Image (cartoon, rainbow, N blue to C red):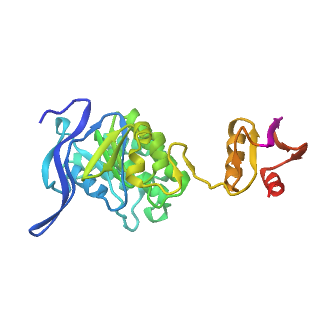
Amino acid sequence: MVVDIATTLQTRGLSVGYRNGQFSTLLFENINLSLPTGKLTCFMGPNGIGKSTLIRTLAGLQKPLAGESSRFDETKIALVLTDKISSNNMRVFDLVSYGRYPYLGWGASLELDDYDIVYQSMAEVNIQSLADKKLEELSDGQMQLAMIARAVAQETPILLLDEPTAHLDLNNRVEIMKLLHRLARKKNKAILVATHELDLALQLADQIWLTAPHKKIKTGIPEDLVLDGSFDDVFKFKGFDLKTGKIKHESHQDKLINLKGEGFPFLWTKNALQREGFSVSSEGKIPIAINQEDEKLTWTMNEQTFNSISELLNLLR
């Protein structure tokens, strides 16, 4: 199998699933994938489709049903799974230092270089201040950052993560996805993330692996997969327009609004109007103008001025 040196991992005719005695369950069949260096790749698909199984197979924790995967120059993989770590009195430093254990001798003692790498890895994910904190004292977001720091400390060119933002709030989800995007470029790593974060993946992923019919995986950049309808085919969105990133609102008011404005005030005013069931069109008979002066926003309709969108909606209703 010939491996492109611009990638760290390639598969050829790979079939993935799991065996139970003499029987096997096939999840993906005859897939040919490549994981590019210096890029963030997001692996997406419906729940239960087999994303975790593929991640574990690529990491070597599970044997493929057929085919092969190859890592350039026989390099190693760092893996971050969703498994909870429960260990009394373990510090963040201790957890991150486990990333150095594959390189230690029989004495399993950290050298000065190892200490430097551990602290540098914590600095990369901005958790230096947590070095002496106990794991049980961490928030879910801090714990996930510590797990990523441990993987960074392994200094491998490939980083695989399975749902690293599961159960996190919006701020933590954004922080972790932006961190992975930055690490891919700064460290020239090939990073693969199995995720449900559609909105973040569309904005941050360099490449998407998208589960497709017939146990296949389609690859491409996010924008192409949006425009060709691939995401719609897979996720069967109900009332969500992926091309605009907006919920589809049904117009049930008999008033057609002609909204004048620009920038974020225009977008959020339009959102409020459409949520309330009003149609917004340049042909509307009810003119509403958005005004901004000295950072103060007002809305004008029929010579009446409103200081908030809420006031405007109250009159329209």
Residue extending farthest left: 22
Question: The N terminus appears in which quarter of the rendering?
Answer: top left
- The residue located at (43%, 62%) in the rendering is 135
Give residue 137's position: percent from left, percent from top.
49, 64
Residue 50 vertical position relative to residue 151 in the rendered view, above or below: below
Front residue of 49 and 237: 237
- The residue located at (47%, 54%) in the rendering is 237
Q: Is residue 299 left or right of residue 17?
A: right
> Can you see residue 299?
yes
Question: The C terminus appears in which quarter of the rendering?
Answer: bottom right
Front residue of 166 and 307: 307
Front residue of 35 and 240: 240
The prevailing secondary structure element of the residues shown in magenta is strand
Q: Quadrant of residue 250?
A: bottom right
Give residue 243's position: percent from left, percent from top.
51, 42
Q: Is residue 54 left or right of residue 206?
A: left
Q: Is residue 169 left or right of residue 294?
A: left
> Can you see residue 147?
no
Q: Is residue 290 magenta?
A: yes
Give residue 276's position: percent from left, percent from top.
70, 56
Q: Which residues are magenta?
A: 285-294
Residue extending farthest top: 5
Give residue 180's position: percent from left, percent from top.
42, 43
Q: Disc count in the image?
A: 0
Q: Is residue 304 magenta?
A: no
Front residue of 110 and 146: 146
Residue 298 vertical position relative to residue 26 in the rendered view, above or below: above
